[in-house]
Image (tube, helix red, strand yellow):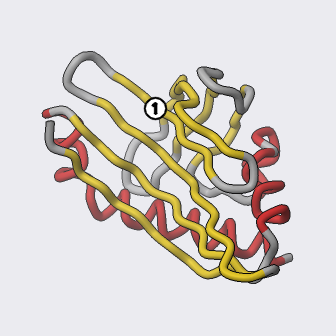
Amino acid sequence: METARIERRIGVRASTDQIWDQIADLSGWDRWNPVETSVEGTIAYGGTIALTEAIPGLPERRAAVRVGEWQPFAQLVWVEKRGLWFKALRYFEIEELEPGSCIVANGFIFSGLRGEMHFDRHRRALRAGVDSVAEALKAAAEA
């Protein structure tokens, strides 16, 4: 199965703790995240997260996703499946370079025929979305 990926990596002058505090506080995402807002749920293996996704240029929508992987201070991954032909994986990764300095990645991986079509059709909007989330997470963690 083919996959399509879009990602933004950004340097953040903050500790893994400061960055993780922003990510782990799901109910506070509306204070910093311009794309995934109104987030509710639990970060736990197989946990469910309900969110509003507002990618500029695409219709706002509610989604229920399942946590696929997570590691405190390092990674949060969730998966959304829409039938047999669409799977979207959304991720946040924190890599510490030295104390108080990290690289943070956020992105989408689409698979399945409809997932790839969605990516191809909305590549610019998705790029703008991951870019805006990267800048917003950096600003919140560095504040």
Work out whether 84 lies above or below 49. Answer: above
* Residue at the outermost top position: 83
Compared across the picture, whether 102 is left or right of 15 comes to left
Q: How many marks?
A: 1
Secondary structure beneath disc 1?
Answer: strand
Residue 27 placement (x, y as % from top left): 80, 39
Residue 91 placement (x, y as % from top left): 51, 49
Residue topped by disc 1: 79
Compared across the picture, whether 81 is left or right of 77 comes to left
Work out whether 95 lies above or below 41. Answer: below
* Residue at the outermost front position: 98
Residue 14 image-quadrant placement: bottom right
Q: Residue at x 74, y 55 (%)?
A: 73
Work out whether 61 lies above or below 128. Answer: above
Q: Determine crowd level at label 1: few under 14, some 14-19, many 20+ residues with C-alpha closer than 10 A.
A: many
Task: For the N terminus, give its image quadrant.
Answer: top left
Residue 64 placement (x, y as % from top left): 54, 23
Q: Residue at x 33, y 21 (%)?
A: 82
- The amino acid sitting under disc 1 is Val
Q: Residue at x 43, y 29 (%)?
A: 80
Instruction: In this rendered view, identify the residue nearer to me: 129 or 74.
Output: 74
Q: Residue at x 58, y 58 (%)?
A: 93
